[in-house]
Image (tube, helix red, strand yellow):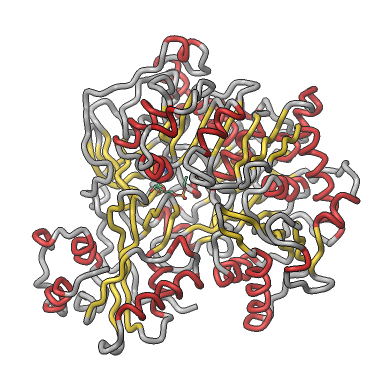
């Protein structure tokens, strides 16, 4: 798959964007006295004291958090240090280690530990399917039994510690079970989002080197039936024909209510039905003790340039960090029902649907469906049905439900709700207020959690009992996290400031490398500002030290909380034979947060634009997935370039935003005349 024309033509960071919009400085939302009094961190003073300790002596702080877990062997702190890091490329390669030498198992800590403590009958998971009548509940003991059986099966097909297992499943209960089963035996899971196409699946399978794949016959999403095994078949035959790479075992869950067994393509010997084999294995399975720095999972995410990056998270630090952030941010107390609407195909489903909650013995609701099926009451029905206490979702979903007005929400009592959460993109103040007032009845604080695939867990987030909220702000850093705001020249700014959001020093959950390309990892995160981890986000710190995220300053677009690299979409577009060149930028979109705006120059301008537009969209759907299809395609005679031939996206972004009076200096372009020509041709 070839890459598009040089991405990132204008490397300069944008720090002027403000997706959040208006800032109402006076508005503060305080937790109720009752909420505050029962919370883990119940005052700003308590936070300040803990924060100071976490920064002054991170080892002591995190060792204390780690002690609640079972460690087969304690970490090595013979030199008085439990963690080591080099965050500065000028001093050599980037290395980060936490709890090194410690031996543990995250599955043991998430399941066995609770069962041994007498919590085996507590509900680990409520599962609510796409259809109204589909649901089940699993106790901690039952999840453990399922995980053990699956891990025994995986062993029986030769999976060993360090092997990669790919998981391509919708939000069935079996998805978190599959992740935990891999973790139990030290296999590295790589979950591939179910919305990815056959091509994108094949690309990730090849890049990860996985030999075992777990999938399903198919599933329903709203009214649609998705024939997942059919997509897998296409991906696997392509892999074999084009790359000579074969998957040895494809474990397929028969989901007869969506796609029946007899209706799926099948390759004997390679393909096995889950129901035919997994239940035959014993419900005990021995554990693989892993070093804290052994890899736990691989998760692909998009960056500014190139193909998706295989982010590697390790065991010990990730375990301690996701558990602590879950407990304090969601202020989780035993017995509460927690619902995270994210998909396990993304990091939120890893850290805050699976590991963080299970490590805290939480009761998690897993929902397979969509908020509007069979009608826009569905989410609110589910909250009342399961008495959900903590509800964690994304601004894009909130905005899409706001369009149905208050009535569907008001028809429910939603009395169980205690806390709300938001993730994935900046939450605009309107959506914040609606969530707070209409859904939360003015009673529930909102934790607006800022973090990334690479950070493993929350970095900037409210601790809801400890301080007041400002709608649209992620507020303050979590323990051990040291944000820095940096100007385009690389200077760290103090006090009130706007710039690129970076981090000083590591935290236990940060990713350790990019699979097979440590140099790319170093350049992407540590190459921009020496001594700092660069997040790719812009940010403003206000007079109270609160952080306001303003969106990406690199070439990543955030569409409905899905992170999409412009380079990937461009690469798909230019693979269409009639496309000469393509450049993709984000633009403000009322529901999705950002939409995808593609500028395309064709080899032959006499063709039927509507037909080509459709063909281009189909190409992106086939190569990446429907969620990455451009919202607008704007045909252009050619694209504005620098004298060295790089596309100047800055100008295209302005055209997409219809800010034509503010195009900046175009005289230095190699082809300034194309700007007027592009403006003359309307987008669609
Ligand atoms: C964006 C998702 C503003 C941000 C957890 C980040 C946010 C990217 C927030 C990471 C938030 C996530 N406020 N922006 N609360 N949460 N983002 O890797 O641009 O899928 O860099 O991880 O989402 O997306 P990712």
Q: Is 620 placed left or right of 290 in the picture?
A: left
Quadrant of the image containing the C terminus: bottom left
Does 245 sit above or below residue 168? below
Residue 443, image x, y percentages: 42, 19
Who is closer to the viewer here, 404 or 504?
404
Query: Which residue is located at x 11 percent, y 78 percent?
Result: 673
Asked if residue 481 shows in the view, the reply is no
Query: Which residue is located at x 26 percent, y 89 percent?
Result: 606
Residue 107, image x, y percentages: 73, 40
Residue 416, image x, y percentages: 54, 22
Q: Is 576 placed left or right of 362 in the picture?
A: left
Residue 400, image x, y percentages: 39, 45
Who is closer to the viewer here, 589 or 153?
589
Tell me which corner region of the image, top left, top right, bottom left or bottom right, holds residue 366: top right
Does 139 sit above or below residue 252? above
Asked if residue 298 shows in the view, the reply is yes
Tell me which corner region of the image, top left, top right, bottom left or bottom right, holds residue 640: bottom left
Does 11 sit above or below residue 221? below
Does 603 sit above or below residue 679? below
Q: Say how many tags the image has.
A: 0
Who is closer to the viewer here, 63 or 3?
3
Query: Which residue is located at x 57 percent, y 55 percent?
Result: 299
Query: Which residue is located at x 56 percent, y 28 percent?
Result: 384
């Amino acid at each position: 798959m070839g890459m598009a024309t040089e991405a990132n033509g204008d490397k300069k960071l944008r720090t002027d964007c403000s997706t959040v919009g208006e800032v109402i400085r006076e508005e503060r939302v305080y937790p109720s006295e009752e909420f505050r009094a029962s919370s883990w961190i119940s005052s700003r003073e308590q936070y300040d004291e803990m924060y100071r300790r976490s920064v002054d002596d991170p080892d002591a702080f995190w060792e204390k958090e780690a002690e609640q877990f079972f460690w087969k062997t304690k970490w090595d702190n013979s030199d008085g240090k439990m963690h080591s890091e080099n965050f500065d490329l000028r001093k050599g390669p980037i290395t980060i280690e936490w709890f090194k030498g410690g031996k543990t198992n995250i599955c043991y800590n998430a399941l066995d530990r609770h069962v041994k403590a007498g919590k085996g009958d507590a509900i680990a998971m409520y599962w609510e399917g796409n259809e109204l009548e589909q649901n089940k509940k699993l106790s901690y003991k039952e999840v453990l039994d399922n995980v053990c059986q699956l891990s025994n099966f995986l062993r029986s097909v030769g999976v060993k510690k360090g092997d990669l297992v790919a998981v391509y499943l919708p939000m069935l209960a079996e998805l978190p079970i599959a992740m935990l089963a891999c973790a139990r035996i030290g296999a590295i899971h790589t979950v591939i989002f179910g919305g990815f196409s056959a091509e994108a699946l094949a690309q990730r399978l090849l890049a990860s080197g996985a030999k075992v794949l777990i999938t399903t016959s198919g599933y329903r999403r709203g009214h649609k039936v998705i024939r997942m095994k059919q997509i897998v078949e296409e991906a696997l035959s392509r892999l074999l024909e084009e790359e000579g790479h074969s998957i040895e075992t494809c474990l397929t869950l028969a989901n007869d209510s969506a796609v029946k067994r007899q209706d799926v393509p099948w390759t004997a010997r390679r393909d096995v039905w889950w129901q035919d084999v997994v239940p035959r294995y014993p419900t005990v399975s021995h554990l693989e003790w892993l070093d804290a720095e052994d890899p736990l999972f691989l998760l692909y995410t998009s960056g500014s340039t190139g193909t998706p990056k295989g982010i590697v998270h390790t065991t010990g630090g990730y375990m301690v960090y996701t558990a602590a952030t879950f407990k304090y941010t969601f202020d989780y107390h035993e017995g509460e029902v927690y619902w995270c609407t994210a998909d396990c195909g993304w990091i939120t489903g890893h850290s805050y649907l699976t590991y963080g909650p299970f490590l805290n013995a939480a009761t998690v609701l897993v929902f397979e469906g969509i908020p509007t099926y069979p009608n826009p009451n569905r989410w609110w029905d589910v909250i009342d049905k399961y008495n959900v206490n903590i509800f964690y979702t994304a601004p894009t979903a909130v905005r899409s439900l706001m369009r149905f007005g208050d009535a569907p929400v008001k028809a429910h009592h939603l009395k169980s709700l205690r806390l709300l959460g938001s993730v994935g993109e900046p939450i605009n103040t309107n959506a914040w207020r609606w969530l707070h007032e209409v859904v939360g009845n003015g009673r529930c604080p909102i934790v607006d959690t800022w973090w990334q695939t690479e950070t493993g867990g929350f970095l900037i987030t409210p601790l809801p009992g400890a301080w007041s909220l400002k709608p649209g702000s992620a507020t303050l850093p979590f323990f051990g996290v040291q944000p820095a705001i940096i100007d385009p020249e690389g200077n760290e700014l103090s006090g009130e400031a706007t710039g690129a959001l970076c981090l000083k020093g590591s935290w236990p959950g940060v990713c350790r490398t990019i699979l097979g390309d440590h140099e790319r990892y170093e350049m992407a995160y540590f190459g921009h500002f020496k001594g700092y981890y660069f997040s790719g986000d812009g940010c403003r710190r206000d007079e109270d030290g609160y952080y306001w995220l303003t969106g990406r300053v690199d070439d990543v677009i955030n569409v409905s909380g899905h992170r999409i690299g412009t380079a990937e979409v461009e690469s798909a577009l230019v693979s269409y034979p009639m496309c000469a060149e393509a450049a993709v930028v984000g633009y403000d979109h009322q529901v999705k947060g950002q939409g995808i705006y593609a500028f395309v120059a064709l080899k032959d301008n006499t063709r039927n634009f509507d037909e080509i537009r459709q063909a281009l969209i189909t190409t992106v759907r086939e190569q990446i997935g429907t969620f990455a299809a451009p919202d607008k395609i704007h045909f252009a005679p050619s694209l504005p370039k620098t004298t060295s031939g790089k596309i100047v996206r800055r100008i295209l972004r302005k055209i997409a935003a219809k800010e034509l009076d503010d195009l900046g200096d175009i005289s230095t372009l190699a082809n300034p005349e194309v700007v007027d020509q592009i403006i003359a041709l309307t987008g669609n």
